[in-house]
Image: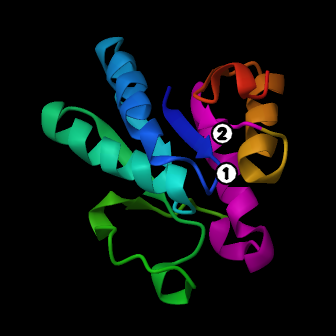
Amino acid sequence: MPCCFFGHHDAPEQLKPMIAEQVEELIKNGETTFYVGTHGGFDFMTIRVLREMKEAYPHINYGIVLAYMPDASPEDYSFIKPEETLYPTGLESVPRKFAILWRNDWMLKESDTVICYAKHHLGGAGKFTEKAIKQKKRVINLAGSEGIK
C-alpha cells in the first residue's frame, strides 16, 4: 500500500533530509507508491524529495494529488509537471471549501503509512495525523518527541 504525507504549512527546511531518509527506508523495504498534496512547506519539500528519489529509484511512483484542477486553483502550480499529478475521481463534485479535506481523506484511505510533521493538533496536519493514528496506520512523525502521539 502507498505512503502519504501530511505536514504543517510552516515546516522548517531542515526536515528535507529527514523526509528523504524515511522515504528511502520505505523504498528499500518495498514501498513503491507515494502521495503528497500541494499546500505548504512540508508538501513542497516532499515533492522535491520524491523527484530526487524517482531519479535514484526509477521503479517508484508518486502522485501530487490536487485538490483543485490547475485552471481553477488559486495556487501557482507552475512547479508541477502534469504527468506528476492525480485528481481523484469524485473530487470534481466536492464543494471547493471541502476539496482539501476530501483530497486528504482520499490519500489517507489509499495509504498504509503516513510520514508527517505534526507538532500540534491544529490544522490539516494535526487533524490527519490524528485520523491516521485512530485508523491504526503506520505513522512516522518527524516532529519527534514534540509531535502528536
Overall secondary structure of the magenta section: helix
Name the amino acid, label 1.
Asn
Q: Where is residue 74 drawn, in percent x and y?
A: 57, 85
Name the amino acid, label 2.
Leu
Check disc 1 and report its element: helix, strand or loop: helix
Q: Where is residue 61 drawn, in percent x and y?
A: 31, 40
Is 116 located above or below residue 97 in the figure? above
Q: Which residue is mark 1?
A: 104
Viewer-proximal residue among 103 and 78: 78
Q: Is residue 98 magenta?
A: yes
Residue at horizontal 84%, vertical 49%?
122
Q: Which residue is mark 2?
A: 108
Give the magenta part as a residue range: 91-119
Q: Can residue 63 be seen in the rendering of this structure?
A: no
Q: Where is residue 34 drawn, in percent x and y?
A: 43, 38
Check disc 2 and report its element: helix, strand or loop: helix
- Label 1 neighbour load within 10 Å: few <14, some 14-19, many 20+: many
Is 2 located above or below residue 123 in the figure? above
Quarter of the rendering containing residue 21: top left
Is 61 located above or below residue 9 in the figure? above
Residue at horizontal 78%, vertical 42%?
126
Residue at horizontal 57%, vertical 48%?
11
